[in-house]
Image (cartoon, rainbow, N blue to C red):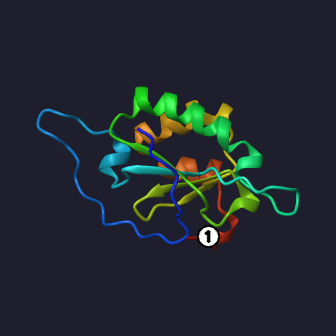
Amino acid sequence: MTDRPESSRGDRDTPPTSRQGKGQEENASSEAGFSTLRLCINFRAGDFLPSCGARGAKRLHEALGEEMARALPDMTLKPVHCLGRCHLGPTLRLSPRGPFLLGAQAEDVPFIVDRLAAGDIAALQAAFPDPEAGGR
């Protein structure tokens, strides 16, 4: 499921809650407390500063939307207008309070969705590291 883009500079997410309904199984990412994957789609005019939109976020959004709808129906893909890491983007962030995943492209979607479904967040962090995390 996708929503309208929103500004998301700060992480104003609420604590993880269970979204499991009666007779419904959740994927491993939901069990890990992540219900949303945010994707910066910001596109800056001109070539002054890098932006996620200019680095492939539109194609990534389309590919993730299709694959997540099929394989991760309990997880929401939310396009946003800045996560503060455009120079390393496209920028993804697991929410609530999850890690940044940086530099993914549309061709990475099968791997991303597979690892999300398995709950293997460490593999995603290794594949799409955030050098600004400082070992977090």
Residue drawn 20% across and 44% down?
Answer: 20
Q: Secondary structure at mark 1?
A: helix
Quarter residue 76 falls in: top left
The residue shown at (41%, 50%) is 36
x and y percent of residue 116 in the render? 45, 41
Identify the residue under disc 1: 133
Report the amino acid beneath label 1.
Answer: Ala
Residue shown at 63%/38% (left/top)? 60
Where residue 31 appears, as percent x and y from the top left, is 30, 49
Q: Is residue 106 left or right of residue 9?
A: right
State the image coordinates of residue 48 (x, y, percent, origin top left): 87, 63
* Left or right of residue 4, residue 61 in this image: right
In-image side of 114 versus 1 (left or right): right
Rendered-image quadrant of the C terminus: bottom right
Q: Nearer the viewer, residue 65 or 46?
A: 46
Residue 106 in percent (x, y) is at 66, 34
Q: Nearer the viewer, residue 79 or 135?
A: 79
Residue 36 lies, with reference to residue 9, above or below; the image says above
